[in-house]
Image (tube, rainbow, N blue to C red):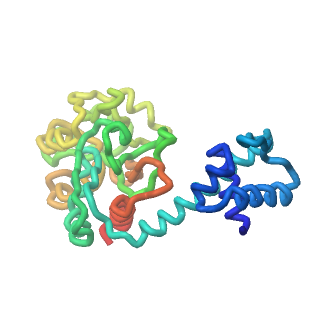
Amino acid sequence: MDKLSGLLAFVRTAERGSFVAAGRDLALSASAVGKAVARLEEELGVRLMHRSTRSVQLTEEGRQFHERCRRILEDLDDARAQLGRATAAPRGRLRVSAPIVGHHFLMPLVPGFLAACPEVELDLVFTDRTVDLIEESVDIAIRSGALPDSRLVSRPLNAFRLLLCASPDYLARRRAPTDVTELASHVAVRFRHPNTGKLLDWPLPPESQEVNARLRTALACNNIEALKSAALRGVGIACMPDFLVREELAAGRLCEVLPGQVSLSGRFNAVWVSSRQLSPKVRAFVDWLAGGGR
């Protein structure tokens, strides 16, 4: 037996409690399993098992070694499975959660992905609530900000900018601000985080953060689409991501306020539950998003 076979014989014996039972699992004789474990002990220079006529028991050193060996063999099995999965075609239902505003950058990528992976059935859930991927059987979530859940892993997607916008009508009525300090005298339309209830601070320079506390908030809402609607109707100045208002800015229906003075870079991340075996459909979708649909 080679070293890997010796480790397998040791681990299976430790789990089954006898050389006979381990031999049945490995299609070997009890004598062959016992000799493999003995050679492993001789090589390591330590006794791993106490033998009796009816069973074997791990020594303290054997218990420690067994845990390490078990993880090594699991990793090997996972590596083999992952190699097999890498050549498998993405297929099956893929449930994806994204913020409501996410359809602006997500939907343009969907047709190309479905064409490239025709055996995948996308199930998109747009919500500003933080979903529990495990409890709600969600494969991938699109999120921004920190990732406090250690059970999740993430991959960064394309960056965006938070900027201030207002309608031409509002700016004609109230005179466009020329300096950050003038924002305190304007009407603010602000986004309220659905999960925390806190108002989104505007992306002001560090030396002007106190202006956030002095903003006159005429309207607060937990739906950023409604926020854009209010800005388009001249209610006030709103802070929104650039991809949400790109068309409105290009058409002149909205104007950027204090360009070059007020903005903040942000980024969405694709997150999923940490797993040794990432399924082909999850890997394919994450790669597609990260590549911008390529």
Lateral position of residue 19 relative to residue 129, left or right: right
Q: Residue 142 at what x, y percent from top left?
A: 34, 49
Q: Is residue 91 above or below residue 95?
A: below
Residue 229: image quadrant is top left
Nearest to the observer: residue 113 or residue 269:
113
Nearest to the observer: residue 108 or residue 16:
16
Nearest to the observer: residue 56 or residue 209:
56
In the image, what residue occupies the spot 79% across and 40% down? 59
Q: Quadrant of the C terminus?
A: bottom left
In the image, what residue occupies the spot 63% across and 52% down? 22
In the image, what residue occupies the spot 22% across and 52% down? 123
Q: Residue 43 at what x, y percent from top left?
A: 84, 60
Q: Is residue 85 above or below residue 171?
A: below
Which residue reaches farthest front?
53
Question: Is residue 202 among the parts visible in the rendering?
Answer: no
Q: Quadrant of the N terminus?
A: bottom right
Lateral position of residue 96 relative to residue 235, left or right: right
Which residue reaches farthest right?
45
Q: Residue 231 at what x, y percent from top left?
A: 18, 42
In the image, what residue occupies the spot 59% across and 55% down? 24
